[in-house]
């Protein structure tokens, strides 16, 4: 191995360790974002749901998550054998003690850590739809089951060589033919539009419908108790997202730089799109809208970060921010209690980002010179988005009904009214005589 190659691999390894740390930061950042949006009497429970997700996923990913996602023994293109690399067997070192090289040249263990953090944030996102009304123990049980039955299979299907991916064994290859060992029209999900955000947003919608509304939903206003905390959480999410998107280039290279810049400008445009629509519709551009627009923009650009130009990223992001702003109103129109706007911010924005890249992908999108192949790319992006919705929706419903019939989801009415923090955790965030009012 030449000194230049050693240096390149060391640089890539360092970047990926940093990226993994940035993505890990995103889950505590989400806890701040959701915690600030919650009421005083439920802020600790909301934050604990994110931290609890890290705890559960950190264990199960090592046990069977990596194997199910990226194992070589695919089962129907849906998931890989969970026992092939159970407990990371044969995944870290060789018999001589040297580290196994991963697909990108650096040690495989780095990729394992990076992918673990993706699984953690994905399930934590769902919690925002369930604020103030579910048992913490049921939530932790759901986390373990959901990542096993929904997230790990989707990761395998999209990124691990399964049905929704770029290989000759996937749906795209069956529809549009192959080019060697790959699909002629490769679906695009650069950093997790389908795997992370469509799956989480769909799960949030399904759970909100099955678990039901809070007793006070649409009867009393739900006001965020700490908007500066919301904005701090949004800022840290934006920071951590560079590991999410630029890290998905799997190296310190130009692709990472492009993803970094595209992420920045799309998020900026989305924030402007959100608060612009707010200003026209409601007469005010709010701090909550700015923070939510940031997250909607990050979600929108996630599947497309490596496949657009900065200019088309601005277009994609601006539309994503406006659509996210419109999407949060769906819960009032249709009467489902998505407490902290997961459906609008994640599902709606992710659907647009996943489908929009089929329109705007550089030199191959339907609107950017792709011609017939561009139309095929647009079609396959719609197909994989809908497939993710259907898969995540059906499996989440089965899990949700199963838990409802066994351990139960809801806290009792008294606990919901008095405050879930005290009922579930025996503590409160603030010593305030007025806490029950907020």
Image (spheres, rainbow, N blue to C red):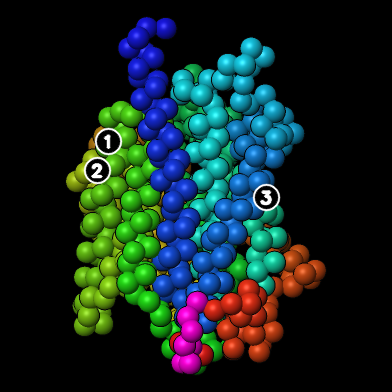
Q: CA distance from mark 1 to mark 3?
A: 34 Å
Relative to 291, say whether 383 is above or below. Answer: above
- The residue identified by callout 3 is 149
Q: Position of residue 208 (x, y in %)?
A: 58, 72
Q: Which residues are magenta?
A: 429-435
Badge 3 marks a residue whose secondary structure is helix
Point out the residue furthest to the front here.
431
Label 1 packing within 10 angstroms: few (<14), some (14-19), many (20+): some
The answer to whether residue 173 is left or right of residue 240 is right
- The label number, if any, that marks residue 257 in the structure image: 1
State the residue at coordinates (43%, 53%). Answer: 26
Q: Position of residue 420 (x, y in %)?
A: 60, 79
Label 2 packing within 10 angstroms: few (<14), some (14-19), many (20+): some
In the rendered image, which quarter contains the N terminus? top left
Q: Earlier in the sequence, mark 1 or mark 3?
A: 3
Residue 235 in view: yes
The answer to if 430 sits in the magenta stretch is yes
């Amino acid at each position: 191995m030449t000194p230049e190659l050693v240096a390149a691999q060391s640089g890539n390894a360092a970047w990926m360790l940093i990226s993994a740390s940035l993505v890990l930061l995103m889950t505590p950042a989400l806890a701040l974002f959701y915690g600030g949006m919650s009421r005083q009497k439920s802020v600790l429970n909301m934050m604990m749901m994110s931290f609890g997700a890290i705890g559960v996923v950190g264990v199960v990913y090592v046990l069977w998550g990596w194997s199910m996602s990226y194992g070589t023994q695919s089962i129907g293109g849906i998931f890989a054998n969970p026992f092939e690399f159970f407990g990371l067997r044969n995944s870290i070192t060789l018999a001589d003690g040297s580290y196994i090289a991963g697909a990108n040249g650096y040690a495989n263990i780095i990729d394992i850590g990076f992918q673990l953090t993706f699984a953690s944030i994905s399930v934590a996102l769902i919690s925002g739809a369930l604020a103030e009304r579910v048992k913490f123990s049921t939530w932790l049980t759901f986390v373990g089951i959901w990542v096993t039955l929904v997230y790990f299979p989707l990761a395998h299907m999209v990124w691990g060589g399964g049905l929704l991916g770029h290989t000759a064994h996937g749906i795209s290859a069956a529809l549009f033919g192959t080019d060697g060992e790959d699909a002629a029209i490769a679906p695009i999900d650069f950093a997790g539009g389908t795997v992370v955000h469509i799956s989480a947003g769909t799960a949030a919608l399904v759970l909100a419908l099955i678990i039901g509304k809070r007793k006070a939903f649409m009867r009393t206003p739900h006001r965020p108790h700490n908007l500066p905390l919301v904005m701090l959480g949004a800022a840290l999410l934006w920071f951590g997202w560079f590991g999410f998107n630029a890290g998905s280039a799997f190296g310190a290279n130009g692709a990472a730089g492009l993803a970094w810049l595209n992420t920045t400008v799309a998020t900026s445009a989305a924030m402007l799109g959100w608060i612009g629509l707010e200003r026209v519709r409601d007469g005010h551009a709010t701090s909550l809208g700015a923070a939510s627009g940031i997250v909607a923009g990050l979600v929108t650009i996630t599947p497309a970060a490596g496949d657009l130009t900065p200019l088309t990223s601005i277009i994609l992001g601006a539309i994503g921010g406006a659509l996210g702003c419109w999407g949060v109103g769906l819960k009032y129109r249709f009467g489902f209690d998505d407490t902290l706007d997961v459906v609008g911010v994640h599902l709606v924005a992710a659907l647009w980002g996943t489908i929009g890249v089929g329109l705007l992908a550089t030199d191959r999108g339907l609107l950017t010179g792709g011609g017939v192949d561009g139309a095929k790319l647009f079609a396959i992006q719609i197909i994989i988005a809908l497939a993710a919705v259907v898969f995540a929706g059906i499996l989440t419903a089965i899990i949700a009904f199963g838990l409802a019939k066994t351990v139960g989801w809801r806290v009792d009415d008294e606990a919901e009214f008095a405050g879930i923090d005290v009922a579930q955790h025996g503590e409160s965030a603030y010593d305030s005589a007025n806490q029950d009012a907020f």
